[in-house]
Amino acid sequence: MKAIILAAGRGSRMRRMTDDRPKCLVEFQGRALLDRQIDALRAAGIQDIGIVTGYRREMLAGRGTAEFHNPRWAETNMVSSLACARDWLSREPCIVSYSDIFYEPAAVSLLLESQADLAITYDPNWLDIWQRRFADPLSDAETFRLNADGTLAEIGLTPDSVQAIQGQYMGLLRIGPAGWAEVTRIREHLSALERDKMHMTGTLQEIIRAGRLPVEAVPYRGIWGEVDSEADLGAYR
C-alpha cells in the first residue's frame, strides 16, 4: 500500500513560523512534523510515500518517493491537492495524511487492517486535547456522529453542544479506488469554484448524504496532535 501526505499549503495561522518553510517542516520537540509522519508510515510498513507539494516545494525535494505538485495551492483546498495524486488513488488503496499532524504507527496500522473503501481514524477522547488548545473547545470543533455499526453518520457541521461530537477526525484516512471514484463523482457535480473550495470533511459529509458508500470510523486512543498555531506546540508539550 502507498501513502500520500498533503503538504501543499503554507499554514498562514502559524504566522512567522512558515514565512520561509512549509507548515509540515515546523518542528515539534526537535523534529519536523513531516519527518514524524514519514517515520510513522514506514514503521507501519509503508515504503512508497508520495507528497503533494505547493508552497516552497523545493524544500520538500527528496522527502518522499514521489512528488505530486499542486501549482494552484494558494487558491485551492485540500481535496484539490489530493486530486493531484489521482493516478495512485485510482489504482490501489492509499493512506492519506494531512501534513500538520503527528501520530504513532499504530494509527496507520488500524487503517491498514481495514477493508473499507473509505475509512478514517478518530479520537473518542478528543475533548481533553481541545480544552488544552482552546478556551472554548466548540470554537474550533465540528460535528462527528456515528451510526450504530461504527460508520460515520455526520461530520464537519457546526456543533451546538459537546454532545454533537462523538470523536475528533484526525486527518488520517484510507481511500480505496471505489472511495476515490465516489469523491470524483461528487466533485464532477460541482462548479469549478466549488471544487476549489471543497475541503475534506465537507467531501465526507457529501458522501454520507449520497448514501452510496459507507465511511468506516476507526477509534484511535494513542498519541496524536494537530498543529494549527504556534500555541498548539506549547499545549502539546
Image (cartoon, helix red, strand yellow):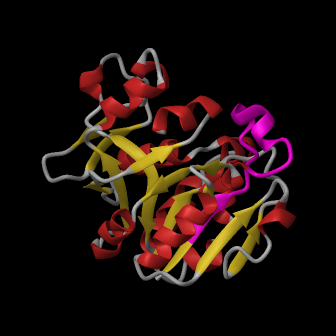
Q: Nearer the viewer, residue 189 or 136?
A: 136
Q: Is residue 6 left or right of residue 61?
A: left
Q: Is residue 188 visible?
A: no
Please identify the residue farthest to the left as the structure is shown: 148
Part of the protein shown in magenta: 4-22
Q: Please give the name of the residue rendered at 82% of the width and 63% of the height, measured from the top-left corner.
A: 59
On the image, the x and y values in percent for residue 188 come to: 62, 56
Q: Nearer the viewer, residue 71 or 121?
A: 121
Say which residue appears at 42% left-offset and 51% top-offset: 207
Q: Residue 152 at x, y = what percent?
A: 29, 48
Whether residue 27 sits left or right of residue 43 in the image: it is: right
Can you name the residue that lies furthest to the front here? 30
Relative height, residue 56 to residue 47 (above, below): above
Above or below, 217 against 45 in this view is above
As drawn, is 16 to the left or to the right of 94? right
Picture quadrant of residue 68: bottom right
Looking at the image, residue 232 sits to the left or right of residue 222; the answer is right
* Relative to 5, residue 20 above or below: above
Q: Is residue 5 magenta?
A: yes
Occupied quadrant, residue 13: top right
- Which of 158/100 is in front? 100
Place of residue 226 in the rendered image (x, y in percent of width and height, measured from the top left): 51, 43
Is residue 142 rendered magenta in the image? no
**What residue appears at the point 47 percent right and 62 percent down from the top-left corner?**
182
Find residue 46 and report its horizontal and vertical position in percent.
Answer: 48, 81
